[in-house]
Amino acid sequence: MLADAAKAIPEGDREVSEAIDFAEYYHRSLSDHLASAELTAAPLGVVVVTPPWNFPLAIAAGGVFAALATGNATILKPAPETALVAHHLAEILWAAGVPRDVLQLIHCHDEPVGTALIADPRVDAVSPAPPPPPAKFAALAPTRPLFAETGGKNAIIVSAPADRDLAVKHALASAFGHAGQKCSAASLLIAEAEVYDGPPSSPASPTPPPASTSAAPTTPAPS
């Protein structure tokens, strides 16, 4: 990720941790569902996973793990800007025993090949984060299941009792971490009036009058 996505090492480390969390989550969730006699499930068929470039491992892993865990053949089509990270993810899964005909990797530009892949009638579901935007996807495949992720206008609220220094630290990290390129980046800071206006200033002390000085009269020197 450092070479392919220009991620700082702490940001890449957290993304690897998130990918591991996805693997644990889908394993445990599937185990719970299989243990229930009241639930039935069937795979959709062929699922195309199209992760974005800003989280090339975590979102790719989440989409691929979910599709594979539920019995689907999966096509991973990464963002062209971060194809190397997706390639390493696929290599890891193939080495772990996932058959290459069950998990396939395709490197291509979004246009026209990526769009054609999403619109292909042999695809049964798509798990994208933009691109394409959900509205564009709906025009390409209006009846196909879509598992979409979108961004939002994310706010941080700073209340009066909050630790101001800690609030500033986390607001900066949220807004500008990952170069600000994430759907959860803070873009709005809401502060209570007391925080916005600052602490009340103490009444100014009256300025003491200037000290008066009197010079002793000088005695003229005798001539």
Image (cartoon, rainbow, N blue to C red):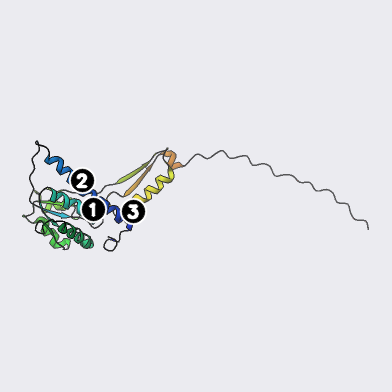
**In the displayed structure image, the side of residue 200 where residue 152 appears, left or right:** left
Query: Mark 2: which amino acid?
Result: Tyr
The residue lying at 40 percent from left, 48 percent from top is 169
Residue 93: in sight, yes or no? yes
The residue lying toward the viewer, choosing from 11 and 135, is 11
- Residue marked by disc 2: 25
Disc nearer the start of the sequence (3/2): 2
In the rendered image, the quadrant that contains the N terminus is bottom left
**In the displayed structure image, the side of residue 218 where residue 24 appears, left or right:** left
Q: CA distance from mark 3 to mark 2?
A: 25 Å
Where does residue 58 sit, x and y in percent of width and height? 23, 53
- Residue marked by disc 1: 58
Which residue extends farthest top? 38
The residue lying at 30 percent from left, 46 percent from top is 154
Query: Mark 3: which amino acid?
Result: Gly
The residue lying toward the viewer, choosing from 22 and 152, is 22
Residue count near mark 3 (Cα–Cα under 10 Å), binned few <14, some 14–19, many ≥20 = some
Where does residue 176 sit, x and y in percent of width and height? 35, 53
Q: Quadrant of residue 205?
A: top right
Q: CA distance from mark 3 to mark 1?
A: 16 Å
The residue lying at 20 percent from left, 49 percent from top is 23
Disc 2 element: helix
Q: CA distance from mark 1 to mark 2?
A: 13 Å
- Residue marked by disc 3: 177
Residue 129: in sight, yes or no? no
